Amino acid sequence: MKVNKIFIVLFVLLSVVPSVMAQKSAGPRHFETAEELHFEAEFSRSVLRKLDVADLKFRASRTPVAAKAEESTDASPYALTFTADVSSKGFFARLFNLKFRERVESTVEPVSFTVQKTTILDEQGKRVRATEATFDRSRGKMTWTLRDPNNPAAEPRHAITDFSGQLQDVLSAIYFIRTQPLEVGKSFDIFIGDGGKVYKIPVKVVEKKRMKTVLGRVDVLRVNPELFGPERLIDEEKGEFSIWVTADARHIPVGGRVKTDYGTFEIKLKKVITDPPPPAK
């Protein structure tokens, strides 16, 4: 089982961004209030019950970008910047001799909600891999590069893939999910660019219930993205991924579960930190 791939999946489904409207329809306004969510992941398998395995932190913000000369000076161009960090901890890391850390950062164009750039730093013990992907929507080209920072002389791996329309990455996919009109019985598709390939991921809303969370006792929806199976993000394993998001307009992820033959990962929201809004001008 590729444990690091499981935690990339955690990025996909638990990263979070503030709810915003498209820049072109919103007009000039301040950058969104930054939001940071802290999650904790536990692992269970047979006699091993609820071992703490990882801490996950996610943050989203607006990043100003330079306006072009032909654009109005009263416009406020920006990109959405998402970051996610996950690191191993506790008995799980010692038991499996597995110490890892992943950091993902993605830049998203807010009008089309299409990813522009993704960087991933994957550290597993002494093994380190650095990935960069750029997305040129005007040309319909995704360029992916994998490097070994510990061996700069080694030849990087490259891939160029065509795409069209709206494309997400492992962080921006959750934003797309949160902006959908989620209702039990509804389904839709997400196209995700990862590892130099484009994947079509069906997403189904399967259940509504009331759940005790760090936000209190709230109504939540269970959403199942189909990440396992042929032509999916994880094609070498069988499994099921579920997330629970609040049933209100915010669709805040409050928990998740990954069930595989390897074991079950449970993820819970533990803390929400919101920066104060910028002063009015």
Image (cartoon, helix red, strand yellow):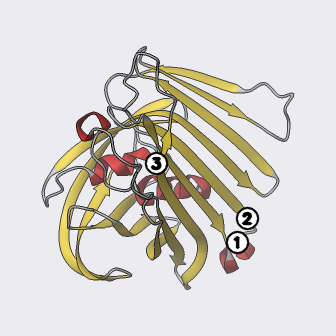
> Compared to 183, does 82 lie above or below?
above
Marks 2 and 1, the one that precedes in the sequence: 1
- Residue contact between numbered discs 3 and 1, judged by CB atoms under 8 Å: no
Q: Residue furthest front?
A: 281
- Note whether residue 235 is visible: no
Q: CA distance from mark 3 to mark 1?
A: 25 Å
Residue 168, percent from left and from top: 40, 38
Location of mark 3 (residue): 171
Rendering coords of residue 1 (x, y %): 58, 57
Q: In the rendered image, which residue does mark 1 sit on? A: 93
Instruction: Identify the amino acid type marked 2.
Output: Lys
Q: Name the amino acid, label 1.
A: Ala
Q: Which mark is residue 31?
A: none
- Decide: few, some or many residues near mark 2? Use Cα within 10 Å; few <14, some 14-19, many ≥20: some
Q: Is residue 181 left or right of residue 148?
A: left
Which element is circle 1 on?
Answer: helix
The crowd level at tag 1 (other Cα within 10 Å; few <14, some 14-19, many 20+) is some
- Assess whether mark 1 and mark 2 are in contact (beta carbons under 8 angstroms): yes
